[in-house]
Amino acid sequence: MKRIKSIMLCVGLSCVSFGLGIIPVLAQNSKEVKSAADENLNKKDKQNRKQGMWFYNVPGQFGDPAYMEFGAYKDDQKTGLWYKLSKEQQLIAIENYKQNVLNGQAQYFENGKLYCIGNYRGIYSKYAYDTFLVTNPITLIDTLVATPSEQGYTKHGNWRYYNPVTGHLVREAEYQVDILLKEINYAQPIGLPATERPKLPHEGGAHKGWNTGHSSSKKSLIK
């Protein structure tokens, strides 16, 4: 736990390369660092809104694993990078939030090794549905797609999956608002171990701290 708090204190101050992503630099486990972390975590303002760095220790339930997560709030809404770690303090995910919704690049890890980089698009409509223009990559015909606002976000943009053991690119996919436009599966070099693609957090169980409640989309424009 001391190590986690040291990491949290360094977020936003300095980062180092980590594979294809980034992780915070570990600070020294000094009494000063521990004290500063304790004093600046999980704070609310006078309006009872969450502000600044928050830390959660989430127990496992409904088939989902226990994990820890931390990141920043602004006016009670998640903002910027949020980090998930296993109980063994291995990195699970780095996700970007805007106005409390997943938006932008996300990175996922298995046993601390990168296996997926993807992109989300947040839905911020005040109405029950939001509409997006989707272009068929083959016919180039544009189609308006209605997406429930309560869904919160969609896969949008390029997704790349890697073999977490070897680091080789396994699959590339392009999405527009959860609709699969195209994908490429890559053969792995002979003799290298094949691994089953781990499930992303939103493809897990029912606990909404870990699984956001959205199953993987079955929509596709690939024939």
Image (cartoon, helix red, strand yellow):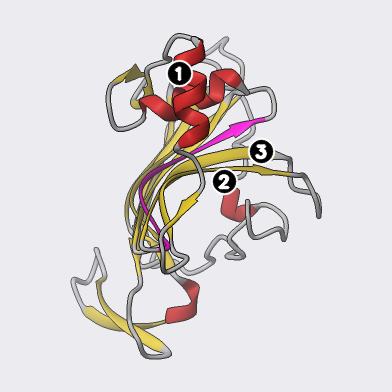
Q: Amino acid at mark 1?
A: Val
Q: Earlier in the sequence, mark 3 or mark 1?
A: 1
Q: Give the image location of residue 73, x and y in percent.
A: 40, 53
Q: Nearer the viewer, residue 223 or 147?
A: 147
Q: For the C terminus, give its image quadrant.
A: bottom left
Q: Which residues are magenta?
A: 76-86
Type of secondary structure dominating the magenta stretch: strand
Which residue sits at x=42%, y=80%? Answer: 149
Residue 79 magenta-highlighted: yes
Which image quarter: residue 45? bottom left
Which residue sits at x=77%, y=45%? Answer: 60
User: In the image, is residue 109 above or below residue 78?
Assistant: above
Q: CA distance from mark 3 to mark 2?
A: 14 Å
Q: Residue 205: in sight, yes or no? A: yes
Assign a secondary structure to mark 3.
Answer: strand
Q: Earlier in the sequence, mark 3 or mark 2?
A: 3
Q: Amino acid at mark 3?
A: Tyr
Which residue sits at x=24%, y=63%? Answer: 137
Q: For the N terminus, give its image quadrant.
A: top right
Q: Amino acid at mark 2?
A: Leu
User: In the image, is residue 198 above or below residue 216?
Assistant: above
> Between tags 3 and 2, which lies in front?
3
Q: CA distance from mark 1 to mark 2?
A: 33 Å
Residue on which disc 2 sits = 200
Which residue sits at x=35%, y=72%? Answer: 123
Local crowd at mark 2 within 10 Å, few (<14), some, or many (≥20)?
some
Residue on which disc 3 sits = 67
Q: Give the image location of residue 122, x and y in percent.
A: 35, 65
Q: Nearer the viewer, residue 37 or 127?
A: 37
User: In the image, is residue 74 above or below residue 177?
Assistant: above
